[in-house]
Each structure stands twice: as structure tokens, then as C-alpha cells.
Image: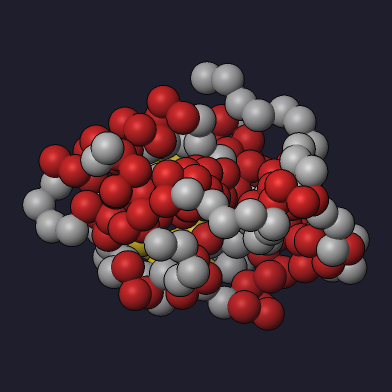
Amino acid sequence: MARYTGPVCRLCRAEQKKLMLKGDRCKSDKCAINKKRPAPGKDPKARAGKRSDYGVQLREKQKLKRIYGMQEKQFGLFFERALRTTGITGENLFVLLERRLDNVVYRLRFASSRSQARQVVLHGHITVNGKRVNVPSYLVKAEDEIAVGETSKGLVIVKDALKEFGKSGVMPWLQLDPDAMKGKFLVSPRRSDITDLADIKEQMIVELYSK
């Protein structure tokens, strides 16, 4: 599947929000958002005008799509699945995105960014319940065990990423044994549990797709 290969800091500046696309760099002074540069692609005077409802809804979708590193078609398929699932569509969408294997690998601190987690999965370094899975969009279920493969435990990028566990821990719906390099997806999170994305207005995304 095609992926965006341009400068990812440009995406953060376009959204005027840290999308955490470059791991540790996003937390440093080198982050493009910290430099207060204007968003790319438009005249500053044009940006000062009020956005239409459609424009605001589109920006919310673009932010969420870029945070999870997905292309338009795949994101649309996830939304359709959320729509078919019993419950509130916006909350269903977040749960599905959080269950993606590449996201879980990132949340378990086996990678410093979701894009790096995607590569770790694609290269066959991750197992689910003891079996190697190399599909980033694989949906993890409650009580699934996610681990770094035995032959991959020496990877420097994984060891470096795991250092973040000592600083920030993991989300409450996850459990991690950093020494064994394995964790567990305890339960699907509620929307209110995903505190680092609390500013995303998922109802606007639902309204956009409902047009």
C-alpha cells in the first residue's frame, strides 16, 4: 500500500499540532511546531479567515488519519466498519484504530513512533500469541499477547524505544514486561481512556462522512 514519503514535519505544521510522527524528535526543541513556523501551502492572510464547517471537519479527519499513519482508502474502510458496529460510531472508530497491531506495538514502547512500529511489524519482528504477524492493520483482541520475536530482541531501535517505558509507562489497557519484551492487550479502551488524543473531535469526522 502506498505511503506518504515526504517530510512528516510538514504534516504537523499543516495541522498546527504535534502528531508524534518522528518519535523522540517530536519531544525535543527540534520539533517544527516549537519553531512557530506558519502552516505550509497558503498565504498567511488567507489562513486568517474563518473556515467553513466542511473545512473544520476535514481538518479533524486529516489529523486523525495522519496520527495513525493511514491512507485515505484504508481510513475510510475503518470508518465503514465503525459505522456497522453497534455503539457510537466515533468511539468505535477510535477503538478500531487503537487495536491496530502497529499502534499497539507503538503503545507498548517497542517503537518510538507509529511509522517505526509499522516497519517493525512489516519486517516480521513481532508475534501475537506466539505466532509471527507482519500485517500492521491486524486487529488485536482482548487478552492477546504481543511480543518481540526471540531473534529480534537484540534490535537497537526496540531497546532504545523501551527506555520510554521507564518515563511514561504504558496506557491503562495494556500490560508490559519490558525485560521479557512482551505485553498484553488487556481490553479495548474507552474513548475517554485515550487521553493523549482528547482534543480530536471525532463527531466532526462522523459528520463529514455523513454528507
Residue 145, quarter of picture: bottom left
When the figure is inspected, residue 65 is found, relative to residue 95, above or below; the finding is above
When the figure is inspected, residue 101 is found, relative to residue 186, above or below; the finding is above
Residue 90, quarter of picture: bottom left
Q: Name the residue: 46% across, 62% down.
A: 200
Looking at the image, can residue 18 be seen? yes
Q: Name the residue: 46% across, 30% down.
A: 72
| Figure colour scheme | secondary structure
Q: Which residue is situated farthest in the left direction here?
A: 86
Q: Where is residue 139 drawn, in percent x and y?
A: 33, 43
Q: Which residue is situated farthest in the bottom direction here?
A: 167
Q: Is residue 194 left or right of residue 122?
A: left
Q: Quadrant of the C terminus?
A: top left
8 or 39: nearer the eye?
A: 39
Q: Where is residue 81 drawn, in percent x and y?
A: 22, 38
Looking at the image, can residue 148 be seen? no
Q: Where is residue 153 drawn, in percent x and y?
A: 65, 50
Q: Is residue 197 left or right of residue 173?
A: right
Q: Is residue 168 left or right of residue 159?
A: left
33 or 185: nearer the eye?
A: 33
155 or 31: nearer the eye?
A: 31
195 or 133: nearer the eye?
A: 195
How many numbered marks, from 0 up?
Answer: 0
Q: Name the residue: 57% across, 77% down.
A: 169
Q: Which residue is situated farthest in the top direction here?
A: 1
Q: Name the residue: 63% across, 73% down.
A: 165
